[in-house]
Amino acid sequence: MKYVEVNLICNPDSEIITDVLAAQLSDIGFESFVKSNTGLLAYVPEPTFSTEKIDTLLQNFFLDAEIGYSFKTIEDRNWNEEWEKHYFQPIVFENKCIIHSSFHRPGGDYNYRILIDPKMAFGTGHHQTTGLILKEILSMDLQNKSVLDMGCGTAILAILASMCGADPIIAIDIDEWAYQNALENVHLNRINNISVLCGDSGLLGNDMFDVIFANINRNILLQDIPAYTKVLNPGGKLVMSGFYREDIPVIHEKCVQYGLTYRDFSEMENWVAVVCEK
Ligand SMILES: C[S@@+](CC[C@H](N)C(=O)[O-])C[C@H]1O[C@@H](n2cnc3c(N)ncnc32)[C@H](O)[C@@H]1O
């Protein structure tokens, strides 16, 4: 099938803008994205392509940015592969943990080597919120702790938790594509103590956890903090990200309302992760 390549020029050309743009374009049928020097190259099957839909999306774009575009029709290629090769580079945390894709062959001596083939699921370690929780995991004692990874995306957090000794682990994502990708990545890393489920906090209830990671967004977290609290063991930790520093007070208030003690937060480019304890 022929594809249309849409070249979106973003001003400013920031990661937040291109991430949000890619997410919104995927809602109107775009399948793959490659970061360019000036914004984003986005690919859509020719029959799905509509300038009207793109214009409406850009008119309603909620972040402060000027975005223009041009387009051309091109022959079919393996878009996921293209996207991964261009967009996802190996990344190292605290000199202890490297995350790379199965087509990378980086050397170096690291305690933890995580293979992620992200396809379209969120979680390569490059987003600030993922990085904040990965660092949190590296600083925790997870030996034999039961862990829940809510909104697991690629399952990157669950995989590192498993490598750090956590057991057993449940990883949940509401998105079918993320669920499938999480299963693939768990398999790729030869991990056998992570159960991956497709759904939301409605799946919780039968198991209790020592640690819960939830990197989703402010509104889902506010809605689901009561459900997370119910399945957190006394003394257990809830680590949340996916929101900004200015959202901390409202998250804090909800946690206290449900009997959690607010412990700490870390920050990267205005994104934060907070740690609460039951
Ligand atoms: C910001 S990504 C985080 C991915 C990964 N955990 C990481 O840290 O990189 C959020 C994920 O939450 C999922 N999600 C959104 N709403 C959800 C919900 N109500 N319950 C479970 N997962 C949800 C999305 O599909 C997405 O994969």
Image: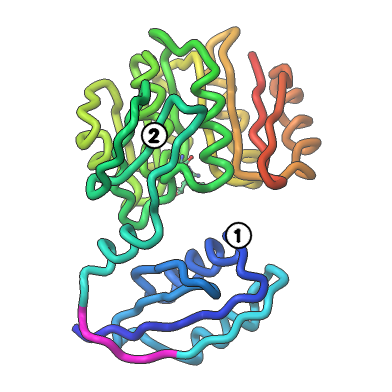
| Element on which disc 2 rests | strand
Inspect the magenta stretch and tell me whether residue 72 lies in it.
Answer: yes
Examine the rendered structure and indicate whether residue 187 appears above or below residue 154.
above
Image-quadrant location for residue 14:
bottom right
User: Mark 2: few, some, or many residues within 10 Å (few <14, many ≥20)?
Assistant: many
SS type, badge 1:
helix
Q: Residue at x 69, y 19 (%)?
A: 260
Q: Which mark is residue 16?
A: 1
Q: Is residue 219 left or right of residue 250?
A: left
Residue topped by disc 2: 98
Give x and y (percent) for residue 189. Answer: 24, 32
User: Residue at 78% of width from left, 38% of height from top?
Assistant: 250
Q: Quadrant of the C terminus?
A: top right
Q: Is residue 4 magenta?
A: no
Question: Where is residue 231 drawn, in percent x and y?
Answer: 51, 20
Q: Is residue 17 above or below residue 43?
A: above
How many marks are shown on the rendered structure? Answer: 2
Question: Is 24 left or right of 80, judged from the image as shown?
Answer: right
Say what amino acid the circle numbered 2 marks: Ile
State whether the magenta stretch is mostly helix, strand or loop: strand
Placement of 73 over or under 94, stated as above or below: below
Between marks 2 and 1, how big is the CA–CA gap?
A: 23 Å
Tell me which segment is drawn in magenta: 71-76
The dot on residue 258 is: none
- In which quadrant of the rendered image does the N terminus lie? bottom left
